[in-house]
Image (spheres, grey):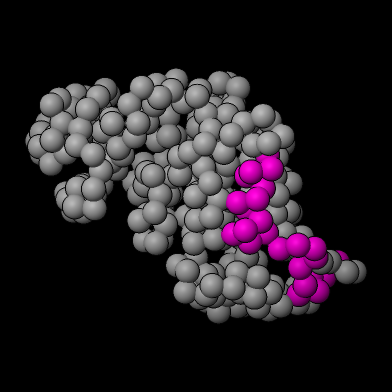
Amino acid sequence: MSLILQSPAPLSANDIDAVRAIAQAPTLAPRAETVAAADACAALTPALREALDAYCGPRSIDWAIVPAGRKLSDFKLVAMDMDSTLITIECIDEIADFCGLKAEVSAITEAAMRGEITDFNESLRRRVALLKGLDASVLDRVYEERLRLSPGAETMLRTVQALGMRTLLVSGGFVHFTDKLKPRLKLDVTRANTLEIVDGKLTGQVLGEIVNADVKARTVQEVCAQIGADPSQAIVMGDGSNDLKMMAVAGLSVAFRAKPVVRAQASVAFNHVGLDGLLQLFAH
């Protein structure tokens, strides 16, 4: 197994030495100012995970233990959640802000993402119902005024696309946003929920099948089948509990700025570096 350290700031020699000792790595050498790597380290155990988190977390260092010898190009698909993963906002919370209900909707969103509300369909319907009567032009305002890509998103996508990997954006959010991001970022496939709009107003209803955890996992598997890839050749990136099922079918799962339940189950967690941290985990 290989150990990778990354940080937004330069890594100190003291931090590199300390982590090398914790992980029982024969060597841990700087690869760049903000990246260090070891070709061998101890197997990841709960105790080692706890020790690495305890040391690295307060120092804004992200660590990862990944299979040695793998290349990024061995993977065929990068699948991403949208809200709070590819982008920095939760779109439904920002939409709700335009009708003065952001706090109420955000509370439901947070509980759902932490896994405290287990019925995602019901939580989405409850939130969307609160938007009834809102002018649909608000959706464009959220996209133009509030939607921002997460750090490193464009660099990560350009690199994996140049390697011939396919990209999937699968979201429990809304097609109004995925449809705009698809051409902007040259994404291959997108899937999300459709808000019903009648006479220019949101009706408070969602049309068709809701994209929940099961649908996300199924979509990853379907896209893998379409491109002739095994799910083990998929990388899945997410932040909330409704991403866990699609992360479980993938060969590599990345928890990005994620809830604790997701960090605990993911292959890798990026709490400090951007999405382009993916590019440091494996040789290209």
Part of the protein shown in magenta: 200-223
- Residue 77 visible in rendering: no
Residue at left offset 66%, top offset 56%: 215
- Residue 130 visible in rendering: yes
Please provide percent x and percent y for residue 47: 19, 52
Determine whether 170 is above or below 183 in the image: below
Query: Is residue 236 in the magenta section?
Result: no
Q: Is residue 7 left or right of residue 143?
A: left
- Judging depth in this view, the residue of 123 and 150 nearest the camera is 123
Residue at left offset 24%, top offset 53%: 46
Count up the numbered dots.
Answer: 0
Q: Which residue is farthest right?
A: 199
Determine whether 246 is above or below 279 in the image: below
- Judging depth in this view, the residue of 252 and 192 nearest the camera is 252
Q: In this view, does 82 lie to the left or right of 270?
A: right
Q: In this view, does 191 lie to the left or right of 246?
A: right
Please provide percent x and percent y for residue 32: 27, 24
Image quadrant for the C terminus?
top left
Please provide percent x and percent y for residue 200: 86, 66
Residue at left offset 65%, top offset 70%: 121
Answer with the quarter of the image where residue 184 lies: top right
Query: Is residue 219 in the magenta section?
Result: yes
Image quadrant for the N terminus?
top left
Residue at left offset 67%, top offset 29%: 228
Please provide percent x and percent y for residue 266: 40, 49
Answer with the quarter of the image where residue 192 lies: bottom right
- Judging depth in this view, the residue of 28 and 118 nearest the camera is 118
Q: In this view, does 97 lie to the left or right of 36?
A: right
